[in-house]
């Protein structure tokens, strides 16, 4: 049960985004409490990824504001928001496929510590970052893949590595754009089991089209239609909502 005045990790106020004359985010007022596990769903073209891009700074709003821990971060760059504690994954993974799993995570640690790349950082920094990266892989059950090249891993394991890279930045907010996209159904629960096991100090907002996964792992759900949040509630409330059912029946599979 949510408290009346939860401590907020993230909030948007009157967020709008136009592409020309087309409004793709429409007066979005969204609140993500600390420690939340919140799903964002909606039909194709609803503006879900656009909304995530507005939160991360990959896109700037046409109007409205984004607040992180009660601080207005609307004017901050992507890198500045990462340093504030916002991390994300993408619908299509962005891993360095020619590098090992450990090197991918090690690089993320070095970037968090502002110690440069694997080539430019000193040996001491590289060694410390590698130890930190390996410790994280152990906690996530990925240590056995540490020396494997990313391109040789099954796609489901690659998605886990991408989450590990995001966690290496020690975020307080984790934004996941379809974390199970492209993952065989038998492996998708591996991704969400990892998410479920994250500490409550990390607030999670995820986009997902598989309603079984959403119902199992989300505490609350927001329904985005044509860039506007039309409904929000518990999984049980959303599943019973006639409007939500009509949206999905009318538009087919959401993504």
Image: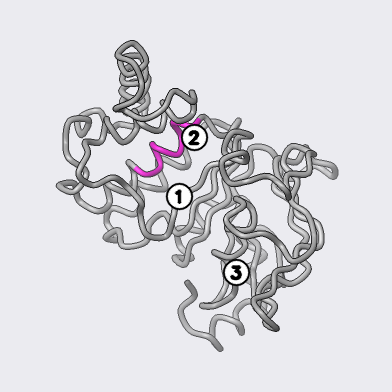
One can see residue 148 in this view? yes
Whole-percent x and y of residue 198? 49, 34
Circle on res. 239: 3
Q: Relative to the observer, which residue lies in front, 118 or 207?
A: 118
Percent position (x, y) of residue 112?
Answer: 49, 28
Q: Residue at x 64, y 53 (%)?
A: 55
| The N terminus - image quarter | top right
State left or right for residue 82 relative to residue 29. Answer: left
Q: Does residue 213 lie above or below 254 as drawn? A: above
Quadrant of res 103? top left
x, y percent for residue 168: 44, 31
> Which residue position is annotated with label 1?
89
Q: Nearer the viewer, mark 3 or mark 1?
A: 1
At horizontal 74% and vertical 57% (from top left) the residue drawn is: 30
Front in this rendered view, residue 34 or 186: 34
Gap between marks 3 and 2 measured at Cα: 25 Å
The answer to whether 166 appears left or right of 59 in the picture is left
Query: Is 210 situated above or below 152?
Result: below
Going from N to C along the chain, the mark reached first, 2 or 1, is 1
Which residue is depicted at the point 18% across and 46% down?
Answer: 153
Q: Residue furthest bottom?
A: 250
Q: Earlier in the sequence, mark 3 or mark 1?
A: 1
Q: Which badge, 3 or 2, comes first in the chain's sequence? A: 2
Residue 187 inside the magenta-drawn segment: no
| Magenta span | 162-169
Q: Give the main secondary structure, helix, strand or loop, of the magenta stretch.
A: helix
Residue position marked by numbered label 2 in the rendering: 198
């Amino acid at each position: 049960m949510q408290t009346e005045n939860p401590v907020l990790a993230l909030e948007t106020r009157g967020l709008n985004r136009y592409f020309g004359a087309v409004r793709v985010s429409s007066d979005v007022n969204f609140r993500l409490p600390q420690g939340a596990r919140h799903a964002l769903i909606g039909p194709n073209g609803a503006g879900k990824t656009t909304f995530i891009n507005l939160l991360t700074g990959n896109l700037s709003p046409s109007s409205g504001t984004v607040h992180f821990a009660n601080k207005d971060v609307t004017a901050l760059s992507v890198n500045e928001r990462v340093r504030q504690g916002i991390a994300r994954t993408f619908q299509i993974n962005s891993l360095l496929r020619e590098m090992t799993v450990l090197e991918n995570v090690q690089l993320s640690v070095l970037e968090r510590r502002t110690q440069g790349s694997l080539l430019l950082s000193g040996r001491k920094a590289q060694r410390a970052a590698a130890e930190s990266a390996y410790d994280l892989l152990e906690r996530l059950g990925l240590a056995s893949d540490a020396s494997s090249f990313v391109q040789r891993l099954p796609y489901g394991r690659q998605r886990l590595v991408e989450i590990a890279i995001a966690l290496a930045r020690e975020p307080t907010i984790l934004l996941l754009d379809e974390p199970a996209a492209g993952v065989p159904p038998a492996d998708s629960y591996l991704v969400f089991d990892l998410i479920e096991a994250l500490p409550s100090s990390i607030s999670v907002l995820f986009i997902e089209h598989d309603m079984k996964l959403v119902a199992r792992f989300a505490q609350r759900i927001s329904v985005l239609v044509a860039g506007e949040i039309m409904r929000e509630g518990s999984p049980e409330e959303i599943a019973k909502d006639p409007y939500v059912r009509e949206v999905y029946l009318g538009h087919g599979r959401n993504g």
